[in-house]
Amino acid sequence: MDDDATTTTTVPLRITDEALSQVMSILAAEENPETLGLRVAIKGVHGVEFAYDLSFEDRTSASDDDLVYDQGDLVVMIPRDSVDNLWGATLDLPSTPGQGGLVIRNPNRPDPVSDEDLNLVGTIEERIDQLILQQINPALAAHGGNASLVEVVDGTKAVVSMGGSCQGCAVSSLTLRQGIEKSIFKHIPEITEVIDATDHAAGANPYY
């Protein structure tokens, strides 16, 4: 059985061997590295992605409800409110040669619509248009994308298309399903199905 900590599947955030090596090199340059752990937290939302905060902190600073575990020789500390949205993510090196730093590849996406109350009025079509205009598109705009309502079928099915950098993007269908769909269901209870009408093959310069 492979006991390499970086391949463990029972922790939310996996760290590749290459990323672990770089983190340990940086940690070694810190004062009292043996007392420090890597704190990984979700600090907010940037467009349709989570924004992250990575820092070395004293291991004793972890709260009782933080998740603390070892990845090789590295102690990882994740705040409890970040655990669920980091489950299945990987800390890795950038795929672009020569690009420095670290990247988190996360299959989870934030809901593009915040929990604030929205004043949506009018027909189903008008309310969906308002939802897209007020909340969804401002979030997608951070990555040059946008969404639009194509039509409502039988009063229960919303046909939505994504454009801009979302068109052709490898994660746009996931964004639609996990984000926009969830938002429409929440705010437009008459809608029971959201259909993706995006021509993903036609997109140019997709954002990854």
Image: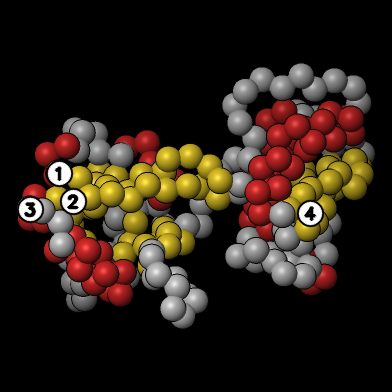
Residue carrying label 1: 58
Q: Nearer the viewer, residue 82 or 146?
A: 146
Closer to the eye: label 3 or 4: 3
Q: Residue lying furthest bottom in this view?
A: 97
Instruction: Identify the element where label 4 is drawn.
Output: strand
Real-space Cα separation, disc 4 to disc 1, in angstroms: 44 Å
Q: Amino acid at mark 4?
A: Met
Sooner in the amino-acid sequence: mark 4 or mark 2: 2
Q: Nearer the viewer, residue 126 or 97?
A: 97
Sooner in the amino-acid sequence: mark 2 or mark 1: 2
Where is residue 109? Give x, y as percent.
55, 49
Disc 2 to disc 1: CB gap under 8 Å: yes
Instruction: Identify the element where label 3 is drawn.
Output: loop
Residue 32, numbered circle: 3
Is 35 drawn above or below residue 124 in the view shown? below
Q: Circle 2: is it few (<14), some (14-19), or many (20+) Cα within 10 Å?
A: many
Q: Nearer the viewer, residue 119 or 192?
A: 119
Closer to the eye: label 2 or 3: 3
Q: Amino acid at mark 1?
A: Asp
Residue carrying label 2: 37
Colouring chosen for the image of the structure: secondary structure
Q: Quadrant of residue 59?
A: top left
Q: Circle 4: is it few (<14), some (14-19), or many (20+) Cα within 10 Å?
A: many
Where is residue 24? Give x, y as percent.
20, 66
Real-space Cα separation, disc 4 to disc 2, in angstroms: 41 Å
Q: Amino acid at mark 3?
A: Asn
- Residue at image point 77% right, 49% down: 146
Disc 2 to disc 3: CB gap under 8 Å: no
Q: Circle 3: is it few (<14), some (14-19), or many (20+) Cα within 10 Å?
A: few
Real-space Cα separation, disc 2 to disc 1, in angstroms: 6 Å
Q: Is residue 103 visible?
A: yes
